Amino acid sequence: MKSAPISSRERIVTIDIIRGFALLGIFLVNMPAFHSPAFMVSTPDYSGVNYWLDLLFQMFVQTKFYTIFSFLFGLGFYIFMSRAEQKGLKINRLFSRRLFALLLFGALHLVFLWYGDILHTYAITGFLLLLFYKKKPKTLLIWAFSLLFVFHALISAPLLIPATEMESFATGLDQEEAAKLGEYVDMYENAPYLEWVSYRLQTEMGQLLANLPFALFNILALFLFGLYAGKRGVFKDVSAHLPMIKKIWWTTLILSIPLVTLLALYKMDVIDVGVYQQNATYLFTSLSGLTLCFFYISSLTLMLRREFWQRFLRPLGYTGQMALTNYLLQTFISIGIFLGLNFYGKVSLAEGTLICLVIYAAQTLFSYVWMKNFRFGPFEWLWRTMTYGYIQPMKKEEKMSNSNRQDTGI
């Protein structure tokens, strides 16, 4: 039987809305890296409204949304694999082709446009998911929590380094950043495209690739939580899992309050641990990112049981259906504005946030119009075509008239 993607009738709208919500959060986090040298300035010195906006981002946005996206990737993995398995298809081979296509998108995005690409990391980590598809739900949870423990043990390790050594390291790092900052900004503002790409490969790629193995721990853990939810059928039958969802909501709310409070106190220097300040802030940013990730997911899941919220939040679902296209479009548009129109380094955090919201609103309208006429977003269509090995019907009426191809519901 020829493999084919899931039909629009089988999409779970709740998942699309959560994905669209996560896409907005990711764009808010990424925007400063589009318009400012965030790669070189690890702790920007904000003042006024930008200071408070940065604090709010750190408390409620930073690390809170890529975690949602990671969870949804694991959930989507289960949906994809289980439907393929029901049709008797070669599931490992099919999903591997899907990952290789995603890796290609990510590599091109990373090399030629922007260092913040997450697609290549998801693709590489996704191959590890194949080892877990047949595991029991309990085993998935054990692995997920174990990976999170290792990840947070690693990011906590610098807190054990003697203060004198930490101070020497931090001073050297600050001096290195300051020495390279002017050159970095100049290349982003003035260099021809090919020279800019060459500079980025030399300056950014080494650090990004060095951090890749480290990032796998956290992302794989979130993938496994999503796989667990898929195996339990949480989003397939929300009503049957309401007690568990409400328990997750209350638990993550109770855990998030002290974590976010401590994060704010560290961020505002109310609690001052000297040379360890940045490490402590990063630790509590990551921990609160996990708890708020599941708080946001469970909140949206419960809210979407009500018709009002289904109608109100439905536009997010259209952007969620086209998540890959919209994610890449955010880069294309932002690079065009800040580099193409020479606004790089000239936009404040607040101004960048406003631009982000305007672009996302336009993407929501674009996604609504597009999905009324087409089955997939442009990059989703290309991704599926590369996965299944034949040209996918794009227009909705084309799908209806193409009766010789059977939709297997994948």
Image: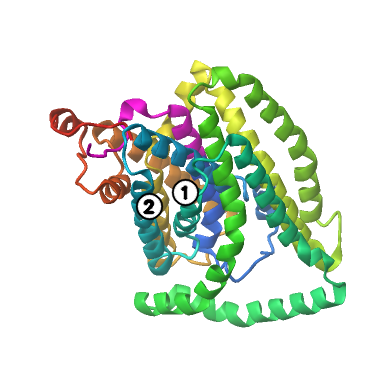
Q: Is residue 303 above or below residue 34?
A: above
Crowding at mark 1 (Cα within 10 Å: few <14, some 14-19, many 20+) = some
Residue at image position (25%, 36%) is: 374
> Which amino acid lies under the numbered mark 2 shown in the image of this protein?
Ser
Residue at image position (34%, 34%) is: 368
Of 251 and 132, the residue lying toward us: 132
Which quadrant is the C terminus positioned in? top left
The colour mode here is: rainbow
Q: Which residues are magenta?
A: 1-21
Which quadrant is the N terminus positioned in? top left
Of 29 and 381, the residue lying toward us: 381
Magenta stretch encompasses residue 4 = yes
In percent of width and height, residue 229 lies at: 55, 33
Q: Are the two marked residues, 2 and 1, in contact with CB atoms closer than 8 angstroms?
A: yes
In the picture, measured across the screen, residue 327 lies left or right of residue 375, that is right
In percent of width and height, residue 388 lies at: 27, 46
Magenta stretch encompasses residue 397 = no
Q: CA distance from mark 2 to mark 1?
A: 9 Å
> Which amino acid lies under the numbered mark 1 shown in the image of this protein?
Leu
Can residue 177 be seen at all in this image of the molecule? yes
Residue at image position (53%, 61%) is: 33
In the picture, measured across the screen, residue 112 lies left or right of residue 3, that is right
Q: Which mark is residue 96?
A: 2
